[in-house]
Amino acid sequence: MIKLDANENPYRPPADLCAKLADFSRGLAYNRYPDKTYRKLRESLALYSGWPAEKIIAGNGSDELILLLLLAYGGPDSKLITVEPTFTMYNHYAQATKTALSNIFYNKQGARLTFPKAEVEQAIENCQQGIIFLCSPNNPTGEIRSRQWLEDILTATELPVVVDEAYYEFSGNTAKELLADHDNLIILRTLSKAFGMAGLRVGYLLAGRDICNMLEDLRSPYNINRFSAGAAEILLQAQKHYQACWEKIKEGREWLYRELEAREEIIVFPSQANYLLWQTDKLSEEKVYQSLLTKGVKVRYWEELPLFGQALRVSVGQQEENQKFINSLDEIIKEVR
C-alpha cells in the first residue's frame, strides 16, 4: 500500500542518522524520567527557529499544545474563531473544553478559494473573550495567510491569535517576524511533517514570555518521552538533509498539481503545503477513493468536508509513489469513460 493520506514526510532518515538514533537509543536510561524542563530540546528548537528557548514550549505533538491553548483561553464563556475547512483538532478540543465555536467559511467558486477576511475581522471585533486559530498553510486547502493582514489583525485585537505553521517548511512563509512586536501572537509548529517525526510526536510553540509562563503551569511535567525528545535533538542537526527532502517534496507537489489539473475530470486546488485537495467532476469521490485502495494507493477521503461535501486529499510522496497514484487514477478515469 502506498500511503498518501496523512501529510507525512515520505523520506526516511539516511543511514548515518539512523545509526545515531540507534546509538542514542542503546545508551538511554529508560527507567528514568526525562528532564521536565526539556532544556536541551528547547535549545535545539531555538537554534532552528531563531526564537529564544525560554519562549518555547515543547509538546507531545502540536495536538497537545492546541489543547493547552484551549484550556488556557477557552471554556464556556469563550469563543474559538476559525475558518472552515481547517484542521479538525481545533474544533475537537474546543468541544472538549466547552468552548463556543465561531466558524467562518471560505468563499468557493470552482477551483478558486477566497479567504473571508472581512467576516473574520467582524467576528474578532464582536468577540470579547476567546482565541483565534489560523492555519497557514491551511490544512486541507493549502493556502497561506498574508503577513500584512495578520499584522493588522494582531494590532486590532488583544485576543490571542494562533498561527499554526505545521507545514511552514513547505511554503517558507512564516509570521515569526511579528512575534517581537505582538504579545498576542502564538506560532504553532511540529516536527511530524518536515522532519518526518510523525510517529514520535514532538511539536513546539513560539510565543511571548507571559504566554509561555502560563502554558508551563498547565503543561504536564513529563509530556514528551525521553527517546522522542533526544531523537528530535539529533534530527534537528540534520537540516541540510531535510532541506533537500523539502525541495523534492515541493517539486513533487508542483508535478502532481500539473498532472491533476490536466485531467478534465479533476478539480484541484493550489497548495503551498505537502498535499493537494481535489474533487472529481462527474465521478464519485468515494468510488475513486475505494478504487484507489484496490490498486494499492491510499489517499484521504472526506464524506462531508465543510463547504466541499465529498473531497479527497493526496499527500506528496516520493516520485515513484506520485507516479503510481497518477497511473492508478488514470486507470480509474478510463474505466468510467
Image (cartoon, grey):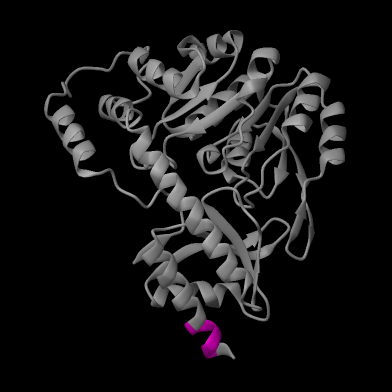
Q: Which quadrant would the C terminus be assigned to in this image? A: bottom right
Residue 283 visible in rendering? yes
Q: Is 5 included in the stretch rendered in magenta?
A: no
Question: How many numbered badges does the structure rendering display?
Answer: 0
Foreground of the two, 283 or 272: 272
The dominant secondary structure in magenta is helix
Magenta stretch in the rendered image: 331-335
Residue 197 appears in the rendering: no
What is the x, y in percent for residue 116? 81, 44
Horizontal and vertical percent position of residue 25: 17, 30
- Judge whether 320 appears above or below 53 on screen: below
Position of the N terminus, as image quadrant, is: bottom left
The residue sitting at 54% across, 13% down in the picture is 212
Image position of 333 with respect to 224: above or below: below
Where residue 244 appears, as percent x and y from the top left, is 39, 44
Left or right of residue 2: residue 84: right
- Who's the residue at 53% across and 64% down the image? 256
Q: Name the residue located 57 percent from the left edge and 8 percent from the top edge.
A: 209
> Whole-percent x and y of residue 181?
70, 13
Q: Is residue 294 left or right of residue 145?
A: left
Q: Residue farthest to the left?
A: 26
Which image quadrant for residue 59?
top left
Q: Toward the viewer: 73 or 312? A: 312
Q: Residue at x 59, y 24 (%)?
A: 69
Q: Is residue 332 magenta?
A: yes
Front position in the image: 49 or 31: 49
